[in-house]
Amino acid sequence: MDEFINKLLNKSADLHKYGSAEMPAGDQLFNVRDDIDVLPGSKQEMIHGLVGSLLYLAKRTRLDLLTAVGFQTRIVKKYNADDEKKLVRLLKYLNHTKDLPYVLSFQNPLVVVASADASYATTHDFRSASGGTVSLGGAVVHAESKTQKIVTKSLCVHPTMEIIR
């Protein structure tokens, strides 16, 4: 994956030339402004390809990118300047942590632990975001972050819906 990450960063070098980021996303990740013009078509295509590559990377070895990349996939068709700033931050974080290894280490006894959590009405369309992990012996073997398709009336129902789904 090192070669894949380097190719991705080289392809997008003009977006993240300067600086680094300690986290893949800021606290404004789920804020979407509709009053800003959408980026031109050629830039949209380039960003669409980058987001697809980031999704591939996040699902395979960089689970720390899942929430930020998941949001990028939901807005990629109507990308504006604010969304581009979020992508730049994600790329700066990836550049800063490109040598971060994906380590699987198992502990005895071998125990399977699943956890799920959700946040209520955090996205721009008031949908809730949920996520979960499954670990085997202390090593995360599956992680996901998604927008819930079901709208519920209670915050308590969200983690339950994540587990059921």
Image (spheres, helix red, strand yellow):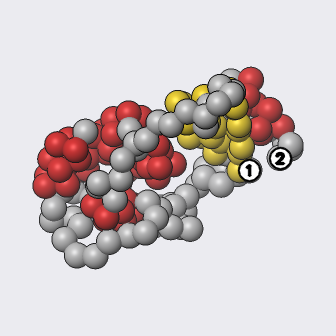
Asked if 108 appears above or below 155 in the picture, the reply is: above
* Residue at figure coordinates x 71%, y 50% from the top left: 119
In x, y percent, where is residue 156?
86, 43
Residue farthest front in this picture = 108
For label 1, count other residues whose C-alpha is less than 10 Å away and answer few (under 14), some (14-19) or many (20+): many
In x, y percent, where is residue 6?
17, 50
In x, y percent, where is residue 124?
58, 55
Cα–Cα gap, marks 2 and 1: 6 Å
In x, y percent, where is residue 62?
40, 44
* Residue at figure coordinates x 19%, y 54% from the top left: 9
Closer to the camera in the image, 49 or 18: 18
For label 2, count other residues whose C-alpha is less than 10 Å away and answer few (under 14), some (14-19) or many (20+): few
User: Which residue is tagged 1?
Assistant: 120
Q: Which kind of residue does numbered mark 2 sit on?
A: Leu
Badge 1 element: loop
- Left or right of residue 155, residue 162 in this image: left
User: Looking at the rendered structure, which numbered label has been put on residue 27?
Assistant: none
Q: In what quadrant of the picture does the N terminus appear? A: top left
Residue 123 in sight from this viewpoint: yes
Residue farthest bottom in this picture = 19
* Residue at figure coordinates x 44%, y 60% from the top left: 24
Callout 2 touching callout 1 (CB < 8 Å): yes
Residue 134 in sight from this viewpoint: no
Badge 2 element: loop
Asked if 135 appears above or below 86 in the picture, the reply is: above
Nearest to N terminus: mark 2 or mark 1: 1
Q: Which kind of residue does numbered mark 1 sit on?
A: Tyr
* Residue at figure coordinates x 13%, y 55% from the top left: 10
Closer to the camera in the image, 76 or 37: 76
User: Looking at the rendered structure, which numbered label has been put on residue 155?
Assistant: 2
